[in-house]
Image (cartoon, rainbow, N blue to C red):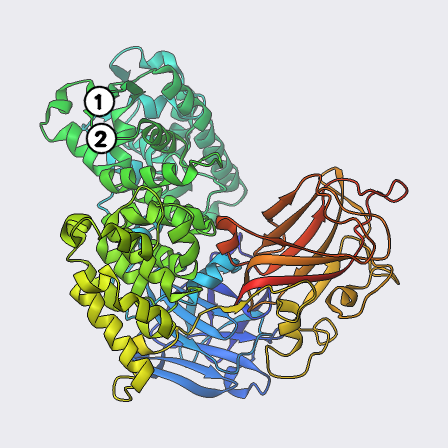
Amino acid sequence: MEKKQKKFLTVAPFECAWRDDLRFKEAGRGCVAFEAFAHNDVTVVFREQLGSQHYHYKRDNSPHYTVIIGSHRNRRLKIEVDGITTVDEAGLGLCCSSAFQSYWISICDGLISVGKGRYPFQNLIFQWLDTKPNCSVQYVGLSSWDKHVGYRNVNVLPLTQNHISLWKHVDCGEYNGEDDTEEDLRGEFGNFDNHQGLGSFLENWELSDVYFIVGNEENAVPAHKLILAAVDSFDLSLLDQDFIAIKDVTYPVLHAFLRFIYTGFTQIPESLLSSLRDLSVRFGATSLVRQCEEVIERFKLNKKLFDSGKNIEISYATSQPHCGVAAFPLGLPVNVQRLQQFYITGEFSDVDVNIEGHGLIARSHKVVLGLWSLPFMKMFTNGMSESVSSEVCLKDVSPKAFKIMIDYFYNGGLNLEDTIDTNILLLDLLLLADQFGVSLLHQDCCKTLLERLTEVGSVCLILQVIPSIPSCKLIEETCERIFTMHFDYCTTACTDFLLLDQSTFCNILQHPDLTVTSEERVLNGILMWGLQPTELCNWEVVDDMLNTITPQDLFGEKFRSLDILLPLVRFSLFPLLLLKKMELSNLSMRIPTFHHLVKEAIGFLELGLPTSGNHPKFQHRQSSFKELQYIRDGDSNGVLYYVGTSYGKHQWVNPVLAKKINITASNPISRYTDPKVLASRTYQGTSFAGPRIEDGRNCSWWMIDLGLDHQLMCNYYTLRQDGSKAFMRDWNFQGSSDGKNWTNLRVHENDQTLSKPGQFASWAVTGPNALLPFRYFRVALMGPTSDDINPWTLSICFLELYGYFH
C-alpha cells in the first residue's frame, strides 16, 4: 500500500484499508482526495483511531463519520454519524464501474463536503453540517460493502484558514459535469479545448522542421528540431540540415524512439530492443538507453519475465506525479535547462512574438506555443497569415504577463515574485490563460489567487476582472464574500469599489453575511458608487450637492440603478432622529425611492408594522458587530470587560480565569508576568513582559487572543503603567488574524505620554486599518524604555480594547 510503490488498492467486500499516513494533520479538519472504481458503495470512514483490516463501520461503537458514495446499488449518497443515517440523498455522487472517477471529501468542524474532481473546492455536489460535530476524527479508512472497490491516488490534504472560510460558504448544488476519469487537472478550472500534450505532434507534419529518412524504403518521418535538441544529450550537429538519414534503421524502431521522446512511454518487441538501444546511443537519448539496458539485464536474468508474443513497455522514470497527459516539459525525457537555453538564445526559433506598442517580446517556437494553446495552434495551421509568417503581432496584451506565460510554457511551472503588484499580474495572466486556452496556467493562477485572498485590499481589483471569466465563478463568489465581511474597509480605504459592475455590487449588498458597523455605511457606499466621486464622501455631502444640481445630472446613467440598490439599505435600523433628518433632506425630496423608503422606516419605528416586520429590511443583520465605545480611562465599556461578563449576560469574572480569552507575554509566565493581571480591575505594582530575540533583535510584547469565533475592529485602546518608571517611548499596537503576521494599527515613536507610575493612557486607532477585524492584538516594544537598568521590560498592568466586536 505504499504510495510510491503501489498505485492501486483493492478493498475486498466488508473490509476496510487503513494507513498511518491517511490522517488529518489537525483533528476534525482535513480533506481526502482519491480516485475510485466501483459498481456501488465507495465508502470512506473517519475515526479518532486507526481501525483494522476487518473493521466494518456497521459494527463500530466508537464515534465516527461514514460517507457512502453510490449506496443502494449506486442510487444514493449517504452520510452516517456513529452508525446512524443522517443524510440519504438520491442521485448524488454516483460511482463509475467503467473507469476510475475522482472524488474529494472534506471535514471541517462537522461540516462535511463531498465533491467530484481531483482538485478540492471544485464541483461540490453536497454539504451537510453536523450540529453536534465530532472534532476529534483524524484517521481515514477506505472501505466497501458487498463488492470490491478499487482506490488509487489517495491523498490527505490539510485545510488552511482561507480554505476553511471558503468551504463553509460555498453554495452546494448537484454536479452535472462530464466524467473526469481520464482528464488531468487542466479540466478542473474550465472547459478548455486542449491538445493531448506533446504526443499530438508525434510524427505529425504540422509545424515540423526536420524529418527522418528511414529504412531502405526511404520513408519520411516528420519531427521537430527543438524537441529533439532538448532530449538529454542529443547530438545537435545532426540538426544542421532539414533531414536526418538513417537508412540502417527500420521504421518500428524509429517510431518507438520518437514515441518515447514525445510521450515518455513506448512499446517495442523484445527482438528490436537492442536496436532501440543502439539508436538511442547514437542520438544521445541517455534516459532511453538506461531504460533499454535495464530491461535487457532483467531479460538475461529471467527470460520468463517477458512474453515473446507481446511488446515490452518502457516508461520514462520521473518524479512527477502522473495525472493524465504529462504537462510539457515535465514527465518527458527533456532537458529543461537546455530547453530554456534555446528559448533565451532563440536557437531553432521559428516565430517572433510582438506586442503592439512594445515591439519584440519573445523569440519562441511554434511547436511549444501550439502544444500549450489551441488558439496559437490554429493560428499557425489554419491558413492564417501567421501560418506562413515568422512573426505574430498581438494587441491589448500585458507584456510582462505574456513573458511569464511563455516562461511557463518552457518550464511547466508558475514562478512569481511576491510583490505589491502580484495580484494585478495574476489577473493579467488569468485573462491571458483564458484568451489562449492555457488551462493548466488558468488553474495555477486560480489556485494562487485563492491562496492570496487573505489580502482584503486586492478583492475590489479582482472583482473588476473576474466576472468576465465564467470559469472563475468560485473566485468571484469568494471575493464577494470577503468584501461583505469587510464592507466598511472596502468602501472607505479606497475608491476601487466604485469600478464594480452593478451585478457584482448588488450581490454584495444582498449577501447574507454582509457585515457593517452601521447601516449608514451601506447608504454611503451606494451613493458613492452611483456618484463616482474622486474622493470618499457620505450621504450628507451628496445631499448638499443636490442644492445646485438635479439627481439625474449628478448620478448620470447610474441614476436608475438607485431604484434597485437603495431598497437594499435597511433604513429601519437607522435612529429615528436621523430618519427624521433624512425625511427633510434633498435626497428625500428629489429621489422618490429614497423618500418612500425613509417614510416606510419611520412608520415602522413609530407605529410598528407587524405584517411587514418579517421582511429582511426590518431585521438586524445577523453578522453585525457590537459597538464597544471608549468613554474614559479604566471604564467598563471595553472588550475585555464585556467578555468577562459572558458577553453581557452575567456578573464580571476575569476573562483569563474564565478561559474566554488568552493573554500571553514574550517571556514565560512568572510571579510578575501574570496574564490575568492585564484583564484584572485591580492595580498591580509590578507587572512586565520580558525581552526575547525575534528576527535578530530585542522585542517585548503582551498579546491578547479573543478566541476562535471573535474579532474586533479596534478604534481605541488603553494601557496602564505598573508601579515602575520603565516608561515606553517606542512601541507598536498591532493586530493579526493568525497570531503570526502582524498589521500595525498605531505606531508610537518617542511617545512621551506615559510619565508616572500607575498612570492610565489611551490612544485612538484611525485610518483604514481601524476597519479591519482581527482576532489577535498585541503591544510590542520596538525600542528601549526610559529605564536604563532594564530597558526592554514592557511594564504595564492593564490593557483594554474598544471598537466593533464580533
Splitting the image into 4 quarters, where does residue 228 fall?
top left
Q: Residue furthest left?
A: 383
- Residue 103 position, x and y percent, is 39, 64
Q: Which residue does the image show at 32% across and 70% down from the upper left? A: 579
Q: Please indicate, yes or no, whether residue 503 appears anywhere in the rendered image.
A: yes
Q: What whole-number distance in Å separates the C-alpha atoms at marks 2 and 1?
A: 7 Å
Q: Check disc 1 and give the amino acid type.
A: Glu
Mark 1 Cα-neighbour bin, 10 Å: few <14, some 14–19, many ≥20 = some
Q: Pointers 2 and 1 in contact (CB under 8 A)?
A: yes
Count of labels shown?
2
Q: Residue furthest right?
A: 789
The mark that comes first in sequence, 2 or 1, is 1
- Residue 607 position, x and y percent, is 30, 86
Q: Taking 2 as reference, is 697 above or below it?
A: above
Residue 361 horizontal side relative to residue 710, left or right: left
- Residue 430 position, x and y percent, is 32, 42
Give the structural element (helix, strand or loop) at label 2: loop
Give the structural element (helix, strand or loop) at label 1: loop
Q: Which residue does the image show at 75% across and 49% down from the upper left? A: 754
Residue 310's disc is none
Q: Which residue does the image show at 68% across and 83% down from the upper left? A: 651
Q: Taking 504 as reference, is 396 above or below it?
A: above
Residue 405 horizontal side relative to residue 14, left or right: left
Q: Which residue is mark 2?
A: 396
Q: Check disc 2 and give the amino acid type.
A: Asp
- Residue 38 position, x and y percent, is 36, 71
Residue 356's disc is 1
